[in-house]
Image (spheres, rainbow, N blue to C red):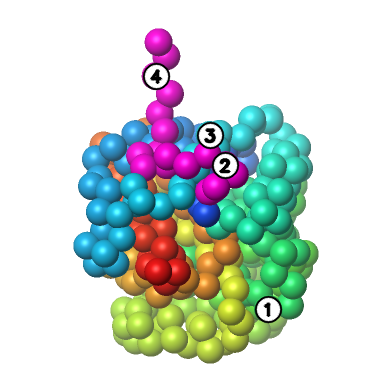
Amino acid sequence: MFYKPEMMDALSDYESARYAIFGVPFDGTSSYRSGSRWAPDAMRKASENFETYNSYFDVDLQDLQIHDAGNIEHYSSVDLMLEEITFDVQPIVNDGKVLIMMGGEHSLTLPCVKACAEKAGDDFGVLVLDAHFDLREDYGGIKNNHACVSRNIIEEVTDNYVSIGVRSGPKEEWVFAKDNDIKYFTSDDVREMGIKPVIAEALEYLDCKQIYLSLDMDALDPSFAPGLGTPEPFGLTDLDVREVIRILAPMTIGFDVMEIAPEYDNGQSALLGTKLLREFIAAHAASEK
Ligand code: MN
Ligand code: MN
């Protein structure tokens, strides 16, 4: 028998699923150190550690309709990879399921945002948690590099966009953000204002009922999540990120956890990312009780 890891409590078949989880083991454009291709299976393995019951929301994941579709076939080229994701996620979104992606690198978020935007229409916004702006026009000559994903979202999908946790980028990105009135909160803003007022201001800005929520795990401080492609000190806490997820999950139609590179730590980043994913499902399910 072969061992096939599956997200614990993802017991539902596709047809009856409310939540459709899938992995994308792709890290082809990672700029500093690669390895996020190993994250989806590391997260499934990490999920075995957790109880099915979430006491905060009084939700038992075992009682929910969660489907783990497995990993999407991966390609060597990022453009082919994004095409494949588009092909695979459109039916999931159009079937009205909540889309949950385990990356893989952050570039993979773009086709998921596109599919959700097409489904949602005008009433839609995007919230990204990230240490980086990801606003480069291209990186190393590649437009769909993971360092460009927010720029592509803003230019190709919607400028109803907010980023939380930013603290790193070349001067040109800070200037670009300012010149283009891009709404963002640095990790220092979060520390000074507190996460709840930041979330409230972000929601007021987005002014919509449906969002895509993208968690680049490097939004977190490396003391919480050291196993990353591009770790950046002075970041958000685990509780900051959990609060964002708890509050925003009910309005989220697509969610992802990206950029974990499990080889660079002893498992804690995959554990935290998986716990946050499970918190997302519990928070969303509680809003539908
Ligand atoms: Mn990113
Ligand atoms: Mn990042």
In the rendered image, residue 224, in percent from the top left (x then y), is placed at: 28, 55
Distance (Cα) linking label 2 and label 3: 11 Å
Q: Which mark is residue 14?
A: 2
Q: Which mark is residue 70?
A: 3
In the rendered image, residue 162, in percent from the top left (x then y), is placed at: 56, 75
**Left of 82 or right of it: where is 107?**
left
Distance (Cα) linking label 1 and label 3: 30 Å
* Disc with the residue nearer the chain's start (2 vs 3): 2
- Kind of residue indicated by mark 2: Tyr
Q: Which mark is residue 123?
A: 1
> Considering only vertical position in the picture, is 205 above or below 106?
below
> Considering only vertical position in the picture, is 169 above or below 41?
below
Mark 2 or mark 4, which is nearer to you? Answer: 2
Label 1 close to label 3 by CB (< 8 Å)? no
Distance (Cα) linking label 4 and label 1: 42 Å
**Number of marks drawn:** 4
**Left of 97 or right of it: where is 191?**
left
- Kind of residue indicated by mark 3: Gly
Q: Which mark is residue 279?
A: none
* Residue at which label 4 appears: 3
